[in-house]
Amino acid sequence: MDAPTSTAVIEGLRAIVGEKACIEAPGDMQPFATDYRKLYHGKALAVVLPASTQEVAGVVALCAAHKVPVVPQGGNTSLMGGAVPDASGRAVILNLRRMNKVLEVDTVNDTLTLQAGVTLQAARAAAEDASRLFPLRIGSEGSCQIGGNLSTNAGGTAVLRYGNMRDLTLGIEAVLPDGRIFSSLRGLRKDNTGYDLKQLFIGSEGTLGIITAAVLKLMPLPRATAVALVAVQSPHAAVQLLTEAKRIAGQAVTAFELISAPALALVLESMPQLRSPLADAHGWMVLIELSSGGEPGSLDATLLSVLEEGMAQGLVLDAAVAASGADAQNFWRIREEISDAQTREGGSIKCDISIPLSKIADFIAEASAAVLALAPDARMVIYGHMGDGNVHFNPLKPKGASSAQFLEANYARVSHAVDGLAHRQNGSISAEHGVGVAKRDDLSAYKSEVELELMWQIKRALDPDNLLNPAKVLPQAA
Ligand code: 2HG
Ligand code: ZN
């Protein structure tokens, strides 16, 4: 871009969002241009922090007129490099954090209407203040934002019971690549008047439009909760235990998270203040949560029945049942810290696999054997949302080894082996983290020609100049 154009764009941006909300100093832009895991170091022409949908539309229209790319950004917690620009310095980062208003809590329609920059934590708190639950639950809830949750179709630890962002959304407002505003903010549970356009923007990682607001579903706030950390014989035993849990507890089964021994060890080693509630070390554990609207304590007996049945069938080796809310929080803390413990340790190969639940245990066995044949000393950090057939299969460098050397020698061949196996078993190579840049080019191998053509046709129809979050999601060779 020539100097007069960039000056004109920056002056235009300042006029739209105000001088204070337009950042241009390289040092100040750097945190916005670097991804959460510090793997992608981009550069930007400017970072803008609009305060309204009209300002977002103004910025996008201005950038479209000058053919300047725009990278939408929420809490910048993407694990896939989806929310930062490339290193060319041509793009404008549009961060939504100032659009952080809860607009309406409707306890009759059971809906929450809010701007895209509201953090997930604030959205959950707004629901709870009205004695309702907004059920999306992910570890980064304090910093991730609803707009990012929508644009990546976030999942997390309560999908088994409540579904992912697609299931939890009734309407959105989004700014299109040419600056027009699309809105379906009507809070309707039924509306069969043609294509469900909101679903095009949910999960498209900001490549088709910038989500600026949403109407989300609220659920009854659970009153009874029962949580246990359970040592199981194997992943196969975990799946059988889940079947028993569903038979005995039905709808109350809210979370069913798998944790491998190396995943637990990693957390306990890096956070000595945390302790495993289980007396001995075990190869595999599951964190089970039941919840319902019944009397507090009313699920305790149900959870015990599940565990007793598991023991009788030889599936369960040991179990610690949370005796209080604080206990339950500590159990959850262990689970939720796994991802950050890996980030601190470095040298982790991230595979985010989903497979039909009936095949997931076989997959874990086969993929583990394949990885150990390639990298025999890797620590098998395997954990996640077993109840959804989704595991984070993240082989980690051996203790004390260099991250760079481990990743250089193993990243490509290990992820290829794991993703390839998942694909051959009809699974997904990105169950909930999205594609971003990290998995972008892998899609050429794992999506059919028809799927890739359709994706490009939709992209070109909405964004013919390829300006909205360019070079994300869609394989560049196609
Ligand atoms: C989780 O389930 C997150 O903890 C992060 O999805 C997983 O870091 C990861 O691989
Ligand atoms: Zn996850």
Image (cartoon, grey):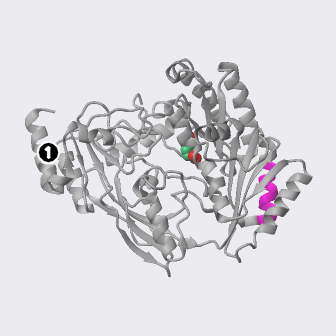
Residue at position x 55%, y 24% in the image: 411
Residue at position x 39%, y 46% in the image: 76
How many discs mark residues in the rendered view? 1
| Residue 188 in sight in this render | no
State which region is magenta.
239-249
Residue at position x 52%, y 71% in the image: 218
Residue 141's place in the image compared with 275, above or below, is below
Judging by the rendered image, the residue that carries numbered circle 1 is: 10
Residue 98 position in % (x across, y down) = 29, 59
Q: Nearer the viewer, residue 305 or 71?
A: 305
Work out which quarter of the rendered image holds the N terminus and state it: top left
Residue 208's place in the image compared with 115, above or below, is above
Q: Nearer the viewer, residue 421 or 466?
A: 421
Which image quarter: residue 232?
top right
Residue 135 position in % (x across, y down) = 56, 63
Which image quarter: residue 393?
top right
Residue 421 position in % (x across, y down) = 66, 31
**Type of secondary structure dominating the magenta stretch:** helix
Residue 60's place in the image compared with 370, above or below, is below
Magenta-drawn stretch contains 263:
no
Residue 295 position in % (x across, y down) = 71, 77
Question: Farthest residue toward the front?
Answer: 273
Residue at position x 61%, y 25% in the image: 399
Work out which quarter of the rendered image holds the C terminus and state it: top left
Within-10-Å neighbours for mark 1: few <14, some 14–19, many 20+: many
Q: What amino acid does circle 1 point to?
A: Ile
Question: Farthest residue toward the left?
Answer: 4
Q: Is residue 27 left or right of residue 444?
A: left
Q: Quadrant of ligand 1?
A: top right
